[in-house]
Amino acid sequence: MIKRLQQIAQWFDDRLHLTKLFESTAGHHVPKSSGSWFYVFGSGTLLCLMLQLVTGTCLAFVYVPSADEAYLTLEYLTYQQPLGWFLRALHYWGSNFMVGIMMLHMAQVFLFGAYKYPRELTWITGVLLMFVTLGLAFTGQVMRFDQDAYWGLGIGTAIMGRVPIIGSDLVHLMLAGPIIAGETLSRFFTLHVFILPGTILALIGVHLRLVLAKGINEYPKPGVVVKRETYDQEYEAIIKKEGVPFVPAAISKDLVFSALVMFAIFTCAAVFGPKGPKGFPDPTYIQTAPQPDFFFLWVYSVAALLPPYTETFVLLVGPVVATLALFALPFISNTGEKSARKRPIAVLTVVVSLLALSLLTWAGIRSPWSPEMTAWTSDSTPAAFLKGRSPLELQGALVLQYKQCRNCHSLDGIGGERGPDLSRIATRLTRDQLIRQVIQGGGNMPAYGKNLSPAEVEALVAFMLTLHPSNVPPVRDSTIPAQAAL
Amino acid sequence: MRFFCRENWGQQLRQATALVGLLTLVSGCDWMPGKPKPAERWQPDTAITDFANLYQTQCAGCHSRDGRMAAARPLNDPVYRAFVDPKIFRQVIAQGVPGTTMPAFAQSAGGLLTDAQIDILVQNLLAGAESDRATLRLPPYRAAPGDVQRGAVAFQTFCAKCHGKDGKGGPTGGSVVDPNYLALVSDQALRTAVVVGRVDLGMPDWRGYVSGRPMTDTEVSDVVAWLISHRKK
């Protein structure tokens, strides 16, 4: 029986040359030193992509990319179809892990100098893969057609619209019209399930072909420098001397890591579930605080924290410079040391980038700059700020709620965080300064002069003048003599 | 050819079958903690019918979480709940009080609440008020302002102790004749304040200004007239 099967296998192999194919691909020889735990991230990313393809295809069986039905099908998947929620969760967590592991892969390649001669094109296709992956992540966020998707798109198009001369045409191209509508969703669906996955598969083909052609980077040793004249012979010597077939010798760690990644994705999906859908994408619902997905939170922070006059410049020039820098990297540092131990600037670059991204992401999670649209009707005035107040001051406390000051200003730490907390405002601003600030605004605060009657301003200021701790006197106008103030 | 002739492939097949079986078993149980609960399902604010939720999101800002100590009138005051006319109470929530800090909540008036939601608020806020109304024998909710001269006298009797002889503020009460204050409150709010007081802030109701001597209906109307006379014309 076994013999018979072997014969059949042999017959096929003679015609399909599977063994030859295997030997020149999976079985090709790699430096023994590359069988390291640091070399597992590339295959981990690839595995995530496979999971995304499978789960994405399954989702596409149910999902209807139309403005009317997308949200309904998401709800159906999440709440009605057996394990539909788990499928959505797998796709969501798969994308998070894919972006995360891809970034690890990139950092590792950078730190190990693997982008240097002769692997420049491998790096460049890798950078392209990163852009396509982020493109998939962004378009995927739009597939979850809820309030986050709607406003995320709005921000994306607002950035595009700032491009000089062709800005409005770009917006039109991106949205398939002047506004976010059903056509927009069709367009993003096409990008997300046809164009970008096709591109990514083609690019991975090139990327892996290059890995095979130019070999996997040997584990760098401090002091061993890359020279264009001698490197190829040196690499050949390494392969001859200590080369091992990738399968089965070097792949074991990749397999273990892949298993861990799968386990982590399945666990996250099972424990934390899918994201959203968070509200029907109707722009008339303003009681929403949209946030992008995890991997774009840092962009969200940057956009929120930039000083207004730098916005257009940074948002348009920044990505171009960053892209050019990534493409130029293998040509700028083409030879020399590979080991991170001898490349302090490279290590510093990674550490600083990681810190910046983490801090911006953390800021994005907290997003204290977003007004709390419901604070004015839901966050009570703390009782301590009401005791012993006069009728006018109490009316001022009400004006503070009614005019929605609370959406940006907290009292006793409760309320919006866009503006400063007002609990001790009387220790910082005098009556005149308070009136001026309320009426004219300034420092990112809108002017409320036209929205407040004189009586409302008087009441509001009277209330704010009571906001100081009992042991700290309110601030005094220096132009008024101390006696008169008392 | 090493790969095609594993001798233990039968064993591997069995293991694979077991694994697939296990996965099927696990996936069959749709119980995992990440499974979204129907209660967490997003719903438009207009679909909320839970009173506590409605009150916390729409009223608590000014009327406080427990309705006892608030910048605006605390709604959990039994005297106030007995005093207020339910029809007007509903109208105030729906349409707001123009010129004051009470906004309109009905969608028809630019707010966010449906008529059904406003009904839920009214029913729950005034629940049980009917029986209190019978026992308390309150002055009527609505009445035309009385006589200003008599009001000045009544003010000295009932209010001056806290708010000062001229009403501009005394030891325990602030000014009630401040034109800015009077510009921000309605005549009805003044009447309600005189009758119901502000228990949360230490102001008694119409029975407690002079102990053993509640204000009469006329006196209430007169004091309100005197207060209104201080409005800027």
Image (cartoon, rainbow, N blue to C red):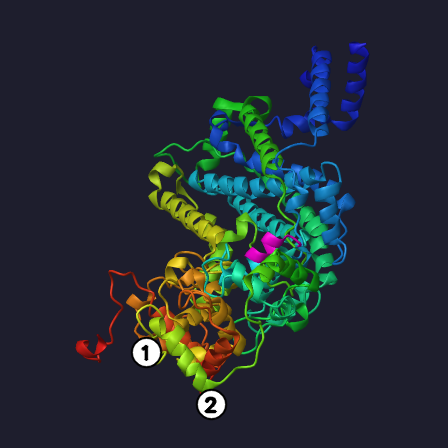
Q: Which of B165 and A464 is in front in this view?
A: B165
Q: Residue at x 73, y 28 (%)?
A: B28
Q: Mark 1 points at which residue?
A: A432
Would you call the spot at circle 2 few (<14 residues within 10 Å), some (14-19), or many (20 or more)?
A: few
In this picture, residue A226 sits left or right of residue A272:
left
Q: Position of residue A258 (x, y in %)?
A: 58, 30
Q: Where is residue A313 in the image (x, y as percent from the top left)?
A: 47, 67
Amino acid type, mark 1: Asp
Report in which chain the residue with disc 2 lies.
Answer: B
Report in which chain the residue with disc 1 lies.
Answer: A
Q: Residue at x 55, y 62 (%)?
A: B136
Q: Where is residue A336 in the image (x, y as percent from the top left)?
A: 38, 42
Q: Is residue B51 within the magenta segment?
A: yes
Highlighted range, magenta: B49-56
Q: Position of residue A103 (x, y in %)?
A: 51, 43
Q: Nearer the viewer, residue B83 or A302?
A: B83
Q: Nearer the viewer, residue A13 or A393?
A: A393
Amino acid type, mark 2: Lys
Q: Quadrant of the C terminus of chain A?
A: bottom left
Q: In this view, does A170 lie above or below A106?
A: below
Q: How many labels does the image show?
A: 2
Q: Name the residue under label 2.
A: B233
